[in-house]
Image: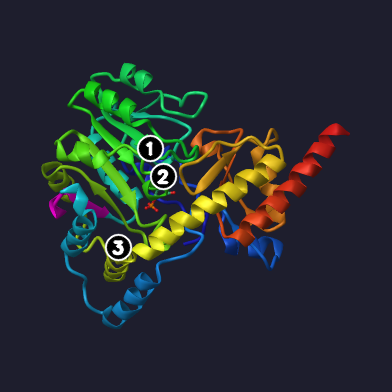
Amino acid sequence: MGNESKTCMEDLKLKPCISSAQLYVAGTSIEEIRRKYDLEEISKLASNENALGPSPLAVEAMQKTLANIHRYPPVADDELRAKLARTLSDSGLSEECFITGNGSCDVLAMITRAFICEEGDEAIICPPTFVVYEMMVNICGGKCVFVDLKDDFTHDLSRVLDSITDRTRLIFLCNPNNPTGTVIDRDELNDFLNQVPSCVLVVIDEAYWEYADPELLPDTLAYVREGRNVMSVRTFAKVYGLAGLRIGYGITYEELAQYLRRLRLPFHINAVTMRGAIAALDDREHVEKSVQHNRVEREFLYAGLDDLELPYARSQSNFILVKPGYDPQLVYERMLEKGVIIRPMAAFRAPDCFRITVGTRAENERLLQVLGEVMGALRMENRE
Ligand SMILES: Cc1ncc(COP(=O)(O)O)c(C=O)c1O
């Protein structure tokens, strides 16, 4: 069929919330920039991937699985859930408390589909934050109620409480928050959860929890043990270095996890992913090395940003939010031409900022050098 052929789509009953949904725009890929600018050296510091790459144990386990890839994987994900429960054995939670998905985005999608069921059901979202909450709520026909972060980029939990109505079904809290890297204070979260009505599910997205100072991070699993309506959502995409594999998980009390598991498709986790994730959980050394690397390199980037006199938010994660004082889209485009990919944050509702991911030392040095050149040129142009 040619492009000009007419379809009968207009006769179908379409859902306006799907027709009007915005598509997710991912960080620009290395391949895209190589094609466009014919560059040899490209650093991607746009999607908060692990600078040290995947766990070697995971890669080996996945390679071994390929020989039997003509077989279906187990229909369920029991082995992975059991491994997760054993790995987090201090939590005292059983494998029945876990759900898994094709990336934590899939877990977030399952939760949203389960709770945003009728038009006008509300979810509270605290921007600037991860854009997928908003996308999912819109696709499900719900209403996003936005409660902006405070000026210091911390969550305004008292305003979140004031925004709860009888239509509120979900509250999304990202901790550490992407893109600000800030964390919610333990006592504040405790007071907050004590006041949230029990008919509202609080979703705490902990995609980056391994990077945060454990002294600062609230113990969300303690709330799960108490049977509160709290769900922690985590991923293998960040500290485990398995973003391309697509595997994430959620943790809540047994009955709620069981309810949500009904939404998963048969064989929803493929055999390669299952083996890779299980092996990654055994590689504590890789996780520790990644966290340590991040801590050192984040400081290196702070020092470089200070030298460039660029304001930024101190981060408990593997990325830093920077406010350049010039259009971040322009800074991004100029850096792209020089082979460094960063991420403007308009879609995350921080239109005057961009976000950089902590890379290897060589990548960080290059980023600072290119950022210095771009900022220098912009400052000159604006002086002229
Ligand atoms: C806060 C947050 N949650 C979830 C995700 C999605 O992770 P996954 O790759 O597991 O779907 C990301 C990815 O960048 C994220 O930043």
Q: Measuring 44% from the left and 61% from the top, which residue is drawn there?
A: 289
Q: Examine the image and state in which quarter residue 136 appears.
A: top left
Q: Is residue 231 left or right of residue 212?
A: left
76 and 355: which is toward the camera: 355
Image height check: is 197 above or below 67? above
Q: Which residues are magenta?
A: 93-100
- The quadrant the C terminus occupies is top right
Q: How is the image coloured?
A: rainbow
Mark 1 lies on residue: 216
| Badge 1 element | loop
Image height check: is 287 above or below 260? below
55 and 171: which is toward the camera: 55
| Badge 3 element | helix
Image height check: is 221 above or below 242? above
Q: Is residue 56 visible?
A: yes
Circle 1: is it few (<14), some (14-19), or many (20+) Cα within 10 Å? few
Nearer the viewer's eye, disc 3 or disc 2?
A: 2
What is the total number of numbered labels drawn onto the structure image?
A: 3
Give coordinates of residue 311: x percent, y percent: 64, 35
Q: From the Cβ of disc 2, is ligand 1 less than 8 Å away?
A: no
298 and 164: which is toward the camera: 298
Q: Is residue 344 left or right of residue 74?
A: right
Q: Is the Cβ of the residue at disc 2 closer than 8 Å to that at disc 1?
A: yes
Q: From the Cβ of disc 1, is ligand 1 less than 8 Å away?
A: no
Mark 2 lies on residue: 212
- Check disc 3 and give the amino acid type: Leu
